[in-house]
Amino acid sequence: MTMKRRTFLQGAATGAMISVAVGAGLLSPRLVLAAWPKGAFQAKSVGEALQDLLGSDQTTASDAITVKAPDIAENGAVVPVTISTTLPDVESISIVAEKNATPLTSSFILGKTTEGFISTRIKMGKTSNVIGVVKAGGKLYSAAKEVKVTIGGCGG
């Protein structure tokens, strides 16, 4: 019974400390999300999104990047996409759905020792190219795959 009481008291003390920190404004989602590239996710074109996110819209096609996605997505609201690369020094991987109203679907900043691999689900409004953009060694590389959407995911 003593261990359960001790565990309860430790949890209560930790909860109280976190509550005080939140109340004092020391912990807030604003601080965590401060680097969120809002403009890139609101951009209306691929070039504008890449320029705002990565500082350039010039990419080099690369066979070292693999875009794995279905040929036909039966539901555009949940399209599984996997981007992998063998490029060295990968800094980030971004996914762009070319004909979406807002093309940038996701962007991942990777650590120095992280493998160049991401897997997620994106939303697509209509048939278009899904482009994987990899920033490696300060340069931008890309690969694309066309995905046909039968049921629109972005209100279509």
Image: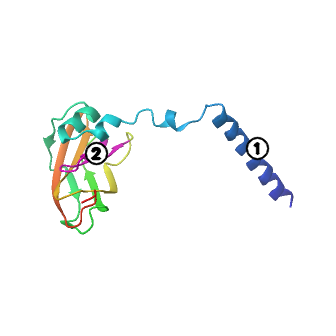
Instruction: Say few, some or many: other residues with alpha carbon within 10 Å of mark 1 (under 14 / 14 to 19 / 20 or more).
Output: few
Looking at the rendered image, the quarter that the C terminus falls into is bottom left
How far across and down, in percent of the image, does residue 132 sit? Answer: 23, 49
**Residue located farthest toward the bottom when viewing the structure as drawn:** 74
Q: Is residue 83 above or below residue 59?
A: below
How far across and down, in percent of the image, does residue 16 sit? Answer: 73, 42
Looking at the rendered image, the quarter that the N terminus falls into is bottom right
Question: Is residue 93 inside the magenta stretch?
Answer: yes
Q: Is residue 83 above or below residue 44?
A: below
Left or right: where 93 falls relative to 7: left
The residue singled out by tag 1 in the image is 13
Q: Is residue 120 visible?
A: yes
Q: Which residues are magenta?
A: 92-110
Q: Is residue 89 visible?
A: no
Q: Secondary structure at mark 1?
A: helix
How far across and down, in percent of the image, does residue 141 sit? Answer: 19, 42
Task: Please report the residue visible at 39 percent of the width from the left and 40 percent of the height from the top.
Answer: 111
How far across and down, in percent of the image, does residue 85 sit? Answer: 25, 50
